[in-house]
Image: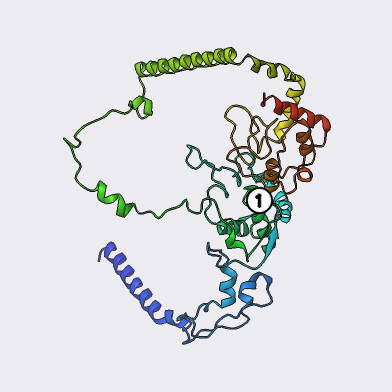
Amino acid sequence: MSKSLKLYGFTAVSAAAMLTAAYNFADRNVTPMPDVAKVMPADAGSPDMMFIAAARAEAAADAKRIGLGREALPEEIAAWNVDVRPDGTGLPPGSGSVAEGEEAFIAYCAVCHGDFAEGVGNWPKLAGGDGTLADKDPVKTVGSYWPYLSTAWDYVHRSMPFGAAQTLTVDETYAITAYILYSNFLVDDEFVLSNENFLEVEMPNADGFIVDDRAETEYPLFSEPACMENCKESVEITMRAAVLDVTPEDDGAAAAEEAMKETNADTAADEKIEQVASASTETPAAEAPASDQAALDMALVEKGENVFKKCAACHQVGDGATNRVGPHLNGIVGQQMGAVDGFRYSKTLEGMGADGMVWNAETLAEFLADPRGYVKGTKMSFNGLRSDDDIAAVVEYLKSYSQ
């Protein structure tokens, strides 16, 4: 017999012997599965197992087919089910005031969101953004965008503060939510939010969301065969594509548009000159009040510009100034109190304006020194300027935008 056949024969015999031994002895080392396996009891003594320890009972032996786990108990489901729905479902009992919320917000939230919820750096803004949702870069805040207050409460309670989620108490969450509402001028400074009045708060954008019905309204229109010729009886050109900014501009189109802008600017300048000339001819006496205006102290204006940086988080001045967390302050000196269009003032300030009170150097100085003392119930959270020199500088700076 050849050497190779001996090797093959030995290998075959060895394999057969190994398989026979495995078959005969393998089942001797397997522990048989009992008909009903024991269920591990809840460890009520371990603080890390508090959700399971709340049950304090063994589950039925037949809870699972293979004997693992048990049915969740109502106490455990309640502990896990912490979300709050728009209709108030899941909202726990509690309350918190705006004043309490301001303290908690500054302690836990202001490092990222600012003292007035205006946002720090690239951290999210929680206040402001009114009227910006249609802009190219809308500011989506609790006041301008969120349709349900429950979203704010639920997110704060479950996910905030950053790095220490779920450490806030229920009352702290109510208070912080109340302060966020106050920062968006949706409630006054004496407001107390609770589970009882939670649904009474009306969010500005509550009606700003619609059901996506494009499958029913738009799809039938765009699924029809497209018209390729004689689709309209007449064609009317209403605007050039370059002006609409929907096509790239070549040099000729850009030059034409620039020429149009220059022409419009020249025309506007000519009209302005004519208006000034006409006014000077018809009412020469109107020049007299202008000469009575006191000259500005430019050094004081420059100092006021630096101090005003404390106010710039909420107020704007200059070209393009708009209402933000607070009203714009263009023309504030000599203006009736609470009279900036499009801004919602506190009832107290509106009443002072209705009584004929005007912002001048004296009233501005008193307000800047103690905002809450001068206007009871003001929505402005700023505590005021402590230096008389700073107050005088800010007033002079505001005068420069009022003349």
- Residue found at the very far left of the displayed protein: 230
Residue 252, percent from left and from top: 35, 16
Residue 390 pos. (x, y %): 79, 31
- On screen, residue 14 above or below 296: below
Viewer-proximal residue among 156 and 363: 363
Quarter assignment of residue 355: top right
**Apparent side of residue 20 relative to residue 74 in the rendered image (left or right):** left
Question: Can I make out residue 259 in this image?
Answer: yes
Q: Residue at x 68, y 71 (%)?
A: 47
Question: x, y (%) of residue 53?
Answer: 64, 76
Question: Which quarter of the figure is the N terminus placed in?
Answer: bottom left
Tell me which residue sits at (54%, 14%) in the image. 278
| Residue nearest the observer in this picture, 292 or 361 | 292
Give the mark count: 1
Q: Can you tell which quarter of the image residue 9 is in?
A: bottom left
Q: Please, what is the three-letter code of the amino acid marked with disc 1?
A: Tyr
Q: Is residue 61 left or right of residue 47?
A: left
Q: Which secondary structure lies at badge 1?
A: helix
Residue beneath disc 1? 182
Q: Position of residue 399 (x, y in %)?
A: 71, 26
| Most foreground residue, 292 or 144 | 292
